[in-house]
Image (cartoon, grey):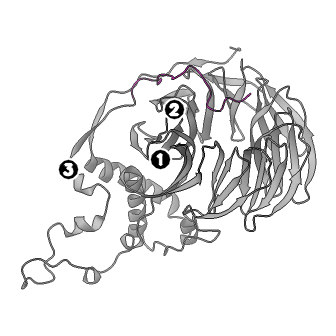
Amino acid sequence: MGAGCPMFTPITAPSPTRVTINSLLHAEVADRASSAFSRSFSSSSTAMSASHSFDGSQPSSRPKPRSYKSHFKQRYLVEAAWRSGGTSVTRNITQEGGVVTSLHLSPKYIIVALDNARIHVFDTDGNSQRTLQGHVMGVWAMVPWEDTLVSGGCDRDVRVWDLVTGACLFTLRGHTSTVRCLKMSDANTAISGSRDTTLRVWDIRTGLCRNVLVGHQASVRCLEIKGDIVVSGSYDTTAKVWSISEGRCLQTLQGHFSQIYAIAFDGRRVVTGSLDTQVRIWDPNTAECLAILQGHTSLVGQLQMRGDTLVTGGSDGSVRVWSLERMTPIHRLAAHDNSVTSLQFDDTRVVSGGSDGRVKIWDLKTGHLVRELVSQSDAVWRVAFEDEKCVALALRQNRTVMEVWSFSPPEEMLYDRPLSLLPRPLDDVPNRPMSALPFDFRRSQDGLAGSSRESQDVDMSDAGPSTAPLQGGNKTFFHDD
């Protein structure tokens, strides 16, 4: 295991908790909305509006909340919609089954890459804008930067696209095998990792290769960038720390017993997930293994680090939440009946997708299942979300489909108006004064999904056993070599 690497076992699941919808929405949601307000209201109103912009590079066309009350109400309604509301549209991507290899949700675009060599570009409402064609084999990696997209795949090429016009600006050649991963360090620099064992640093303004990073002995499966440092994970069981500007390897992280499939890096810590079922935490400056997080029983192919919280997903179907401050588990979630294929979290929630065809939303704080989001599918390829939007790509009846969910409240619910301007319902008594509002008038204005069920109690059980049963053995979802 390596000296100085403590081992941890998962905690036991908490007992079932009984809560009411009323207390859930009015206590917990209000508490979160207040917390979100305190973090963001001190910023300028323009910045606050832009943080929820999904219609382009300009801030949202929605009028800016002008008061504490309207901002608080917006956050309250968004949280309520994530829990039991929202609206969705479904788009057919292909008429025949195809593997979605990459998904990105940006302030202007939804971008979907497939193993059929095509890249589909949509606006954030799910309306098709264009299809990027140029790769001759499957696209396995891509990364957007504003109106620029960089992609790579089985044809060994890295392509630079203009998302506004759909034009291919450069075709970058040099790799001798599949381009498996891509990231951008700034608007001008892209870094690709390949099955040819190398990483290449590209200047996408000129189309030139700045550096070739040589050192891995097998396929480069994943990479992450922070500042001038890029970290890479390989099927040779090691991770490496590189200087982008110097083009040299600074550290080699050794300790895993099998291929590395996932990596995260925040500038202070490197986290790796492997086929050996372990999650390892590393110091990138000394190459010391700080901890081994154990609990998964199969490949750990999904992980994300945010502050001192780490969330991991495995081919065993489980999602686990860890504290990096204490190097201990917080929650273990029996999320899916087979592989966790996609994973993302923020300060409030975890969204997971699985090869069982389900997308699930979890409460990050409690570990409770909040809801299942999309229609039942054969498999879920990818999921991505922002504050008020969630996108899922799935296989359904042998078609690749996209569901776009919006949790933005209607504009008319956000802004305060004098009672005299509000529409007032008429009742059966013709001589009743218009000022005599019904007793439940204010409740009818709340517009919260599920408000008619506020008084009903529901049982919210915990996620259950720590590991979901495997179907067909410990198979990885995409069967990579």
Q: Which of marks 3 and 1 is in front?
A: 3
Examine the residues drawn in magenta and state their main secondary structure.
loop
The part of the chain drawn in magenta is: 464-481
**Identity of the residue drawn at 48% across and 32% down:** 336
- Quadrant the N terminus occupies: top right
**How far from the left and from the top, in percent, is residue 305?**
61, 39
- In depth, the one of 446 and 474 nearer the eye is 474
**How far from the left and from the top, in percent, is residue 298?**
59, 22
Give the residue type at disc 1.
Thr
Gap in angstroms between the C-alphas marked 3 and 1: 25 Å
Q: In which quarter of the image is residue 212?
A: top right
Query: Judging from the image, what secondary structure is the residue with disc 2 in?
Result: strand
Q: Which of marks 2 and 1 is in front?
A: 2
Q: Please determine whether, in this image, residue 359 is positioned above or below residue 55.
A: above
Whether residue 183 is visible, yes or no, is: yes
Q: Name the residue under label 3.
A: 455
- In depth, the one of 212 and 356 nearer the eye is 356
Position of 247 compared to 400: left or right?
right
* Precedes in sequence: disc 3 or disc 1: 1
